[in-house]
Every structure is written in structure tokens, then in C-alpha cells.
Amino acid sequence: MDPIRLAHCADFLATTSASTLIYAAMDGWRRQMVQDGHDMIDRALALTRRVREQIEELPGLHVLEEELTSHEASKDLDIMHILVDVSGLRITGYQAHDWLRENCRLDFGTTDHRRFEITMSIADDESTVQRLMDGLRLLIDAAPDFPESPPILIPDEGELDLETVMLPRDAFFGPVEDISVEDSVGRIVAELATPYPPGVPVFLPGERINEAAVRYLRSGVEAGMVLPDPGDASLKTIRVVKE
């Protein structure tokens, strides 16, 4: 059995839904929220607002807020998701995430070439906030010694609107071959390539590959971008429809 084809099939059927253990605890959580939820969320929101202000005061860091609202479909903001721009430190979000995880045992969700996301919850308190702020101050001190990251070649938005020239099912299930990504421009892709974040595919089976998308993905991988679904995560090769 082709292990790459097996992984691709699993990706199409996989889910990020909660486990049965979480489902089993939902009634207890619902009871807690009915009894104490208002006060718990009020405390969490107040703590989060203070954290956002404290991070904004740190040199080289910027908390995105107004930039995220009233733009396209965004009409409101969940302030407990704190998106921090680290470009003022001349490092990438990938570097910040990796350094904080390795040196401060702090883990984050969304990261990209210039941002990472801190997720607050009702479980946070003064001790977790202090640990976070200590880690961010250490990051600021360490950032000048980080190696320079390769630039990510971000195309214009329209350049990532690839042309669909074959039904996805026909491209995915039909004859395929793995070729060098440098030779793939103009070919029909037969697998997904989804940078995470944001988790939106750049390549979908059946689309015609263009040079801008290849440059974006290859430069992103070199800078630390995560591509969970291609058979070759380094994207030195890409799976295309066999001609």
C-alpha cells in the first residue's frame, strides 16, 4: 500500500472534533457554567484585558486589535485570543513560538511569519500570566541573537486564486506522479498543500499550479511554515496528475 496515498485519504476523513472523554465531561462543565459562569468569564476577561495592555507596553511587541475588526467579514473580536506581532523584534512568529516552547515551556496555537497567538481561558490566573510575561521579556532579550530568517515571498491575493481545471476527485484518484516542485508550474496538483495557520489550502487537487504559489510555499517552509498534508512536507516534491 502506498503510505502517502493512505495518509491523504486519512486527511480527507480526519476531524478536529473533541474526544469522547471531553464529550463525557460536558454536563459537568455546563453545570459549572450555569452556577458560576458569569463570574468566571468576567474574571477571565478582566485578566485578559490587563494582559493585552501589558504586552502592548513591551518593546518590539504589538497586540493586534483594531486591525482585526470591521475588515471583510470580521465584525467583532474575541479578546481572549491575543494575536501578537513580533516583527518589531526582527524575528518571525515561527522563531518566537519555537524559542518560547523550548526555553520557557510555553505553547501557543497560531503562528505565522510575523505573529503568534496567545489563548487565554477561565483556567488562567495571576501565576500563569506571570509565567507568560516572564517568558515574553526573556524572548525580547534573546531576539537580537536569533539568526536571520529567510524571507517569505507573499504573493498578491489574486495570485493564490488558482484555476480549477479538473474535478478534485479525478485528480486525486487518478494516475499521479511525484515531481520536483520546481518543475510543477503549469501541472495539475493531485494533493492538498495547506499552510497552518490559517489552515486554508493553497493547493487543492484539480488546480493548476502557478509560480507565485510555489514561491510562497517553498519560501514559507524554509522560514518555518508547517505544511501538514503534502506527502513531502518539505515541498521539494509535489504530487501531480500524471500526463
Image (cartoon, rainbow, N blue to C red):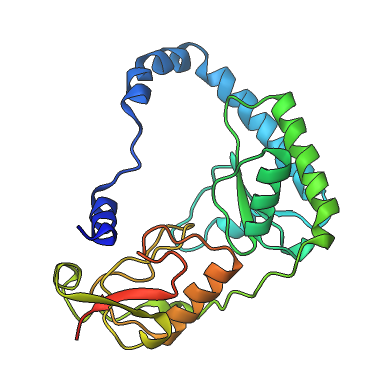
Quadrant occupied by the N terminus = bottom left
Can you see residue 158?
no
Query: Which residue lies at the image location 40% right of the left edge and 80% below the top edge?
Result: 181
Q: Is residue 212 above or below residue 124?
A: below
Picture layout, residue 62 above or below residue 129: below
Image spot of residue 66 (x, y percent): 63, 56
| Residue 24 to residue 156: above or below | above
Along the viewing direction, whichever of 7 and 151 lies nearer the viewer: 7
Number of marks drawn: 0
Residue 12 drawn at (x, y percent): 25, 54
Picture quarter containing residue 54? top right
Q: Is residue 156 left or right of residue 67?
A: left
Q: Nearer the viewer, residue 4 or 15?
A: 4
On the image, the x and y values in percent for residue 140 come to: 82, 52
Q: In the rendered image, which quarter contains the C terminus?
A: bottom left
x, y percent for residue 152: 59, 74
Q: Residue furthest front?
A: 1
Is residue 241 among what the camera can see? yes
Residue displayed at 44% across by 75% down? 236
Quadrant housing residue 222: bottom right
